[in-house]
Image: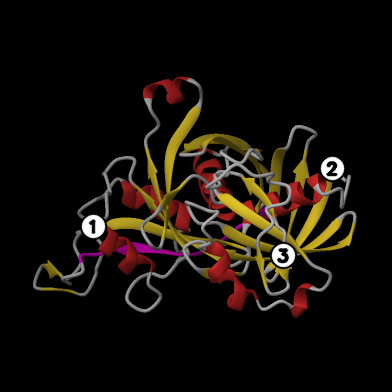
């Protein structure tokens, strides 16, 4: 018997909220788990994402619920929680298919996450059997294009470089922030839906980012904190990158961090290539950047598994 794919499961279960037909430890006509929100877990370069479809049944978890869901022992476990909601009437008229909330494990709702956006873009395209799709986040409208069976390109928007756009706590040249700790000095400030500070080094393998990342993340210059990137140019078309992400973790891959790092390399004159391959601990992605700092990111996505979120009391 052929088991349903996660996409087929999502379609079936989104229309069956009681789930009484599913044998979840049932006896005497009573089932332990009778209802819950469907989730599907995906990852982009091991940046793992929990996605909940709330287009038909609203889902507004509390901070405690978000933390439990993302906890790797007590919950599903993930770097972010995505909640997919219906688009506004005006967005729907313009072809936008969903509004996507991106929530960090600390409950902070953020404007952008490149890996997460590729994952939900892939799901929305597969759901509709389309080659491209647009959805909105707090950072604006993102357009995804299917480049392979599990390879997605996404327009990430324009990199912002003005001090108040990042934002910084005072007016300063964002090309040289003049802050640092240990071997990490004088980063470039950028914003691609979330704030980034990018440090360039000669040998990334000699940098203990877990040691320096927390202090830089919480530097007084960043009123909303910042993602801390450390980049090494291998050649004009290739970069190695490590990122310490808000709310406080060394990530295996950061899509928005890769966009910011390539933009920072252009601003510093370290490359003039339109396309740059960014190598991170979990793999690589391609970042394409235009003269006005519009960015397209291309990278892989994959499915982990699907299931249901249940009440903490069960």
- State the residue at coordinates (42%, 37%): 99
CA–CA distance between discs 3 and 1?
Answer: 55 Å
Q: Which residues are magenta?
A: 299-311
Q: How many marks?
A: 3
Q: Which residue is mark 2?
A: 274
Residue 176 vs residue 48, the one in the foreground = 176
Residue projecting furthest to the left: 28
Residue 243: image location, x then y, percent: 63, 65
Q: Disc 1 designates what residue?
A: 19
Identify the secondary structure beneath mark 1.
loop
Q: In the figure, is residue 101 to the left or right of 155?
A: left
Q: Secondary structure at mark 3?
A: strand
- Vertically, is 206 above or below 95? below
Which numbered disc, 2 or 3, marks the residue that appears first in the sequence? 3
Mark linked to residue 8: none
113 vs 194, nearest the viewer: 194
Sequence-wise first label, 1 or 2? 1
In the image, residue 240 lies at what x, y percent?
78, 65
Disc 3: which residue: 185
Element type at marker 2?
loop
Q: Which image quarter: residue 278? A: bottom right
Q: How far apart are the two marked residues, 1 and 2, measured between alpha carbons?
A: 50 Å
Of callouts 3 and 1, the N-terminal one: 1
Q: Position of residue 109 (x, y in %)?
A: 40, 50
Residue 2 is inside the magenta segment: no
* Colouring style: secondary structure
Residue at 69% x, 55% y: name it.
Answer: 258
Neighbours of disc 3 within 10 Å: few (<14), some (14-19), many (20+) = some
**What kind of secondary structure does the magenta stretch mostly adopt?**
strand
Quadrant the C terminus occupies? bottom left
- Which of the 4 image quarters holds residue 207? bottom right
Quadrant containing the N terminus in the rendered view: bottom left
């Amino acid at each position: 018997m052929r088991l349903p794919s996660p996409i087929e499961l999502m379609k079936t279960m989104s229309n069956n909220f009681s789930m009484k037909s599913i044998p979840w430890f049932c006896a005497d006509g009573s089932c332990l788990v009778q209802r819950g929100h469907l989730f599907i877990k995906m990852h982009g370069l091991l940046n793992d994402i929990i996605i909940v479809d709330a287009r038909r049944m609203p889902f507004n978890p509390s901070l405690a619920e978000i933390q439990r869901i993302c906890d790797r022992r007590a919950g599903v476990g993930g770097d972010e929680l995505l909640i997919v909601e219906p688009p506004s009437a005006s967005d729907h008229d313009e072809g936008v298919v969903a509004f996507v909330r991106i929530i960090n494990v600390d409950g902070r709702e953020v404007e952008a996450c490149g890996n997460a956006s590729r994952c939900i873009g892939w799901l929305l395209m597969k759901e509709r059997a389309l080659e491209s799709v647009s959805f909105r986040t707090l950072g604006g409208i993102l357009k995804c294009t299917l480049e392979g069976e599990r390879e997605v390109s996404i327009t990430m928007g324009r990199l912002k470089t003005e001090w108040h756009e990042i934002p910084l706590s005072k007016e300063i040249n964002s090309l040289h922030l003049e802050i640092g700790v240990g071997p990490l000095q004088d980063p470039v400030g950028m914003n691609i839906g979330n704030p980034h500070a990018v440090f360039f080094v000669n040998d990334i393998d000699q940098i203990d980012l877990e040691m320096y990342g927390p202090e830089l993340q919480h530097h007084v210059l960043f009123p909303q904190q910042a993602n801390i990137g450390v980049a090494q140019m291998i050649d004009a078309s290739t970069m190695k990158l490590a990122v310490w992400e808000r709310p406080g973790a060394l990530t295996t891959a950061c899509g928005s961090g890769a966009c910011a790092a390539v933009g920072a390399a252009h601003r510093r004159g370290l490359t003039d290539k339109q396309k740059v391959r960014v190598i991170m601990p979990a793999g690589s992605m391609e970042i394409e950047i235009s003269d006005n700092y519009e960015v397209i990111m291309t990278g892989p996505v994959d499915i982990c598994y699907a299931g249901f979120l249940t009440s903490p009391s069960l």
